[in-house]
Amino acid sequence: MAVKKKAKVKAKKKPAPMNAFYAQSGGVTAVINASACGLIETARKNKTKIGKVYAGRNGIIGALTEDLIDTSKDSAASIKALRHTPSGAFGSCRFKLKSLEDNQREYERLIEVFKAHNIGYFFYNGGGDSADTCHKVSQLSEKMGYPIQAIHVPKTVDNDLPITDNCPGFGSVAKYIAVSTREASFDVASMCKTSTKVFVLEVMGRHAGWIAAAGAMASDEDCEIPIVVLFPEVEFDQKKFLARVDQLVKKHGYCSVVVSEGVHWPDGRFLAETGLKDAFGHSQLGGAAPVVAQMIQKELGHKYHWAVADYLQRAARHIASKTDVDQAYAMGKAAVQFAIKGHNAIMPTIDRISNSPYKWKVGMAPLSKVANVEKMMPSNFISKDGFGITKRCREYLAPLIKGEDYPPYKNGLPKYVTLKNVAVPKKLKKFEI
Amino acid sequence: MAVKKKAKVKAKKKPAPMNAFYAQSGGVTAVINASACGLIETARKNKTKIGKVYAGRNGIIGALTEDLIDTSKDSAASIKALRHTPSGAFGSCRFKLKSLEDNQREYERLIEVFKAHNIGYFFYNGGGDSADTCHKVSQLSEKMGYPIQAIHVPKTVDNDLPITDNCPGFGSVAKYIAVSTREASFDVASMCKTSTKVFVLEVMGRHAGWIAAAGAMASDEDCEIPIVVLFPEVEFDQKKFLARVDQLVKKHGYCSVVVSEGVHWPDGRFLAETGLKDAFGHSQLGGAAPVVAQMIQKELGHKYHWAVADYLQRAARHIASKTDVDQAYAMGKAAVQFAIKGHNAIMPTIDRISNSPYKWKVGMAPLSKVANVEKMMPSNFISKDGFGITKRCREYLAPLIKGEDYPPYKNGLPKYVTLKNVAVPKKLKKFEI
């Protein structure tokens, strides 16, 4: 009997599953936490395959400084609430790892931290720059002999990751911009007889005009609104632009202008350049709207109002797209499922099957084809005059802004969760970044 | 028999009820159409007392130019949809009537139009300047012998009308600003380790800081957020402000700043003065946020982001406050009920009965005490340091932002109604304004 019992115990004993590291990177979105939710909930359902999920406090910096968050300390209810909470619950960062050749010290440190905490899975939730970081980490197995599976979870309001049909985060910004443009246009239409005739809204999008394009969705067959879109893909032609605005004001009494922060003059200068650069070396922009508005006042004499949506657009979980929330969750879930199947150096993707009815499925892309590739708007998405979108673009965008997914409210305000974010005890020496 | 029949017909015959004129004035809001809805629906239920409701196309200008809209041409469903449609469905205007002594010609014209269209009720939906116009019209009976009942329907996002506890339009802007400040603050909190540390949001409110105060509601006992509010009631003290921001960034890693467009230097100059003035002689403002943000960057070195909500805040019907929608509707309804009872020169008001549970009722104020009186924030609503709100202010604001009242959606966008706005045939000669 005693022997039999012992044998039974022995048979049950398996090696403890490897833990996972998860981090949020770059600009946060209304739904990046929905990906975190999908990832953590799926990992919790697969405890025999994946141990704990350790989140990096402030992204990859948390890995380098061994500042790990034990997500198991938060309740199922708190993790569930991530689905309706905007921003990055564990903190994000703008920090790009150099290549292995240029900064071996950082990669050695990552391995040291991974080893110390039994981490075998690396989930990185971000955009193009982050996909590059994730790709570098995925090569640690081969180049430095440390077995790790690195999977990138797509996220970017800029919608500029390749291969995937669209990027989680974008649909909700697109919905916010479409809704806001419609609402503000109704406002201007009411005021234009004696007051404001042109409303200018500045939206995000440095190099790709995806978000600006969403502004054009405010107008449809049920609700026609005169809108001029200024895309970063189209060189700014002041004369042509002012003529278009004036034509619309003469015809409708008013018009709205949706201007991307990335709109630039023919010589490449942004309308809104400030001279500041972020950690990735990108110019920090802001202020294209007042430039455009003052141009309209000076040259056409029309009274204007302008708004700069800035963080409001990407944080607006209160008006998130249901499609977007569902897809963000699905990407986090798929990342874990792919990891369990043994994949490395990949990114789950959203593959569109059909437009009407809208159908999509989860696909997979190799990181070698994702990292450092920026997807621009197809040229046939921008109308010939350069100020609007085509039917094809409209068909692409329509399902992405569809459906509402309201967060719960308390006392008139959305009830967003703040996690405990309990630190995992440190085992290593301090590391200076 | 024949005689009896005739007598019956005679007994039924009453003089046709007088028609009503309704107009929207000044800056529009997310819920001014809810007042129009309440007013028109209530008039339709009282057809024996009030004939047709004629709306002024573009406010009072529609009355002067005999450009009247026959609201009876729109279906019950369309009128009902006004309740969830932002902006002014009949067009608004910024146009202030001079005094009777200074411009008798315009008042004579009003009487001419009222007579031609059998108008005995004048409903004017606006803020302080409009209350003044409405008050002048109410005196036509006495001063020019034309019998008319003039009733002002309160509306202003600035919340600065006297006597009424609050103004329809304000609660929804307050909710939008509170929600947006919470969301953007979550965003900055995620980014602050390596990127943005201060987020600056510019909000409306030229002279009264009601809307700015709503920004502070983003932080509560369930969700603490470091927020600095800049009120127009408090002279801007750059040194003290920067010290406060720096202190919060040092403590929390980040902070949000909510700045009213009306914030000014000790010498009275607005931080954001542009030099332009509107039809009422008010300075046109915009751009306090970038001024404050750049000050923070220059003096403290913190990376910033800034947003200017502008029209987005007052048009945001998608996140309207249920309290606000209900009250806006009730004000339109009460205006008709008061008119039927024979009142003139009054404004229905919102009278607060208790805070917890929140109870209110419809009251009545004489226009002589409303016109040209601007209600400022009570000084005990602003915290001693000048950068926040007191418990008393919080208790005042809390019920006003409570409840959601989502509009219906189609294809991911709110389904707002555009009325037919059929013109009433003109009977008079043209009139030049």
Image (tube, coloured by chain):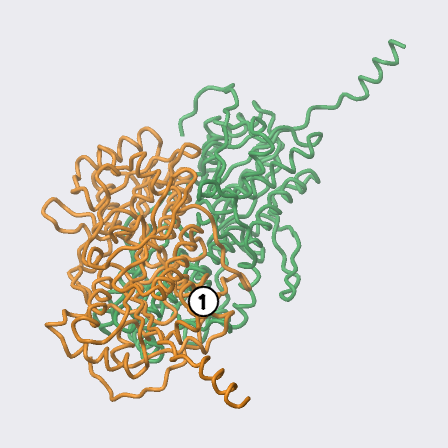
Chain colours: A green, B orange
- In the picture as drawn, the residue positioned furthest to the bottom comes out as B2
Image: B121 above or below A155: below
Which quadrant holds residue B239?
Answer: top left
Identify the residue at image location x=44%, y=69%: B46
Which quadrant holds residue B114?
Answer: bottom left
- Horizontal side of A254 relative to A403 (left or right) equals left
Residue B398 x, y percent position in the rendering: 38, 41
Q: Which residue is mark 1?
A: B41
Depth check: B312 or B378 in front? B378
Depth check: B404 or A417 in front? B404
Q: Is residue A48 visible?
A: yes
Q: Crowding near pointer 1: few (<14 within 10 Å), some, many (20+)? A: some
Depth check: A282 or A256 in front? A256
Q: Chain ID for label 1? A: B
Depth check: A52 or A254 in front? A254
Residue B33 x, y percent position in the rendering: 40, 64
- Horizontal side of B239 relative to A357 (left or right) equals left
- In the picture as drawn, the residue positioned furthest to the right comes out as A1
Image: A400 above or below A391: above
Secondary structure beneath label 1: helix
Residue type at numbered disc 1: Glu
- Horizontal side of A166 relative to B102 (left or right) equals right
Residue B341 x, y percent position in the rendering: 35, 64
Residue A401 x, y percent position in the rendering: 53, 59
Quadrant location of the N terminus of chain A?
A: top right
Quadrant location of the C terminus of chain A?
A: top left
